[in-house]
Structures are given as structure tokens and as C-alpha cells.
Amino acid sequence: MIRILDRYIFTQLIGPFLFGFFLFVTIIAIDPLMSTLQSIVNENIPMSVMGRWFLNRLPQDMIFTFPMSVLLANLLVFGRMSKDSETTALRAGGTNFFRILLPVVVFALTITLFSFVFNELVVPTANQEARNIRRTEIMRLVEPEASENSVMRTSDGAFAYARKVYEKRGLMEKVLLEYYDDKGVLEKRISAATAEWDGSAWVLKSVIEQSYSETGGLAAPATRPQMRITTIEESPEDFARQSKKPNEMSYSELKGRIEAYERTQFMDTTEMRVGLAMKTSLPFASFFFAIIGASFGLTNNRSGAFIGFGVSILIIFIYYVMMSLFTALGKSGFLPPMLAAWAQNIIFAFVGFYIVKRIND
């Protein structure tokens, strides 16, 4: 009986979820679609180019539709079950509401996992491609000769920073290499005015090398006109690629970028840490939206689908207003990055479990 109930609720959620997903994607796609049509008509941009830009632009917005669709699905399904007195019959049979929520939790976690994987594998690549199409094919901008502020972890373990990277010329300016031991203690720092790629290794010029002892002692800096480093396998293309924006990087890429920036003390990473935390908090919004949606549906509300849709829009509006507020506070330094990204989820979790507990009592 219990397995039948779980399967029944789980399968009932699939249809409304897909309906909500396509509905919200359509709504969100209106603005980029209008921009696409205007560019085709007014600027004579080929339809194939705008089509590719539109399709690559869409995944970034689709991430926001997963929680919305989970919320709408739970509101519609449990609203109908309440209207048809199915939840009343379940309660009369001794099934408490926490047990009814089990298939809801499984469904929400499934969407959460899918959302996270989608955000990791599809969104960064699509965002980067959309930006390239917009710059080179729509706005017809010439790619800059140099990429700026490249920071990366090299193959020999160094944290490398380059002020400018001239990919086509195989040249970098204002180069800094820092080597740390297993405990995170700085061992050696190498700075150079320029670094040239000779096809197999980097040739540093106007070099200053500084070594640090285990006791914290500082050796006298050694200067040399030139140094050839064969342990760094990364090419100019690899360094130039580090100019990607945070929304064009996966969780691991962004985490590595933040660690590199913090190691070299290159810049404040507060805003990037908020973005990193958002890569997990936004997919998990599906879980908390499911609890909220099921909670409202389990209140014996006999209203129809239109009321459920209206309630979902109101809840979505409140959630994303809170998310924008807490994110802004986090980027400004008023809240810790993790709390700024997860605050709205925490609030919704407490509200949802409070409502379910009241219903169950």
C-alpha cells in the first residue's frame, strides 16, 4: 500500500512539473526572443546566428525554472488531492503527512541533482558560446589582442598570475609565480617583467627569485636576466582561457579560480564566493520549494488550478526578491558568502516544515 502511494504521488508530480517547466521557460524566453527578432529585422543579422545565440542564451535562465516548476507541480497535485478528499482519506487511514511527503522529497532531490548537473555541464559552456557569438557575429567586435588578469594553477603546482596575456604572440607581461608546500606555506616566489613561449617552455626575462625557509626566514632575492622554465606545461592558450567569467565556469573551475586569487592576494573574492555558493543553493531551491508547495496543498484548500498558479507566482516572487537582497548583502560584505546564498532556502525550509508540522498535529 505504501509503495503504491509513493509511486502514485511521484508519477502525479511528473506531468505538472513538465507543464510548469515549459510554461516558465516560455515566459522567461520572451525577452531574449524579442531581442533575437529585433536583431534579425532591424540589424539584418542572419537568422542562423541569432538562433544559435538564443539557444545558448536559454540554459542560464532555465536553471531558475526548475524550482518554479517543482513548486507549481506540488501546489497543483496536492491541491487536487485535497479537493478530492484524498489527503483526508489518507489521514483517516493512519498515514501522517510526513510520510506523505517522502515521495515529494525523492522527486525534489531528483530534480535538484539534475539541476546541479545541468548547471555544471551545460550552462557554463552555453554562456561562453553565447558571449562569443554576441561579440564576434552580432556586435562584430574584434577580439582584444590581450587577455587581462589571468590567474591559474599550473602543472608544476605554482599559482601563476599574468597582468596581460597575448595569446597569438605567445607573450605575457608582469608575471608572478608562487610555490607553496603541502601545508600551504609559501616556499618560493618568482616574478618577471615578461614571459615568452618558445613552443615547449616559458622563457622569463628580468627575473627576481625569492626563496623562503621553513622557519620563515627570507633569503636574499636573486636577480637574473633570463630563466627558462620547462616544468610549466600550460601554453598561451591555457593562460588566455582564464579570462572566463564566473557564470562561464563550473563549480570546480570557479573554486580553483578563487583559491588562486586568494593565494596570490590578487583581489577580493567575496563576490566570487557568493557566486560559488549560489551554484549549490539555487539547485537546492527545488527541494525547499517542494516542501512549501506540498505544505500549501495539504491545508485542505479546495481552490482550483488558477489559484494554485497564482500562489506559486507569489511565492516565487517572494523567494527571488529575498535571494536578490541576501545576495547583494553578501557581495557587499554584510553577510558571509555561504549565508548570503542560502538564507532564503533556510527561511523557506523553516516555513515549510512549520506548516507541515501544524497540519500533522
Image (cartoon, helix red, strand yellow):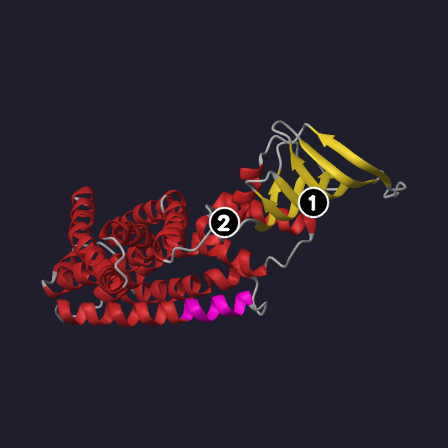
Give coordinates of residue 148: x percent, y percent: 59, 52
Residue 171 covered by magenta stretch: no
Q: Is residue 301 left or right of residue 149?
A: left
Q: Crowding near pointer 2: few (<14 within 10 Å), some, many (20+)?
A: some
Q: Secondary structure at mark 2?
A: loop
- Answer yes or no: is residue 302 visible: no
Q: Crowding near pointer 1: few (<14 within 10 Å), some, many (20+)?
A: many
> What range is drawn magenta here?
322-331
Give coordinates of residue 270: x percent, y percent: 58, 60
- The circle on residue 175 is 1
CA gap, disc 2 and disc 1: 19 Å
Give coordinates of residue 196: x percent, y percent: 66, 37
Q: Amino acid at mark 1?
A: Val
Q: Amino acid at mark 2?
A: Lys
- Answer yes or no: is residue 240 visible: yes
Q: Is residue 141 left or right of residue 184?
A: left
Quarter of image, res 227? top right
Closer to the observer: label 2 or label 1? 1
Disc with the residue nearer the chain's start (2 vs 1): 1
Q: Work out which quarter of the rendered image holds the N terminus and state it.
A: top left
**Residue at x 62% of width, y 32% of height:** 155
Q: Is residue 87 left or right of residue 125?
A: left
**Residue at x 38% of width, y 58% of height:** 139
Q: Secondary structure at mark 1?
A: strand
Task: Please name the residue that numbered disc 2 is placed on.
Answer: 244
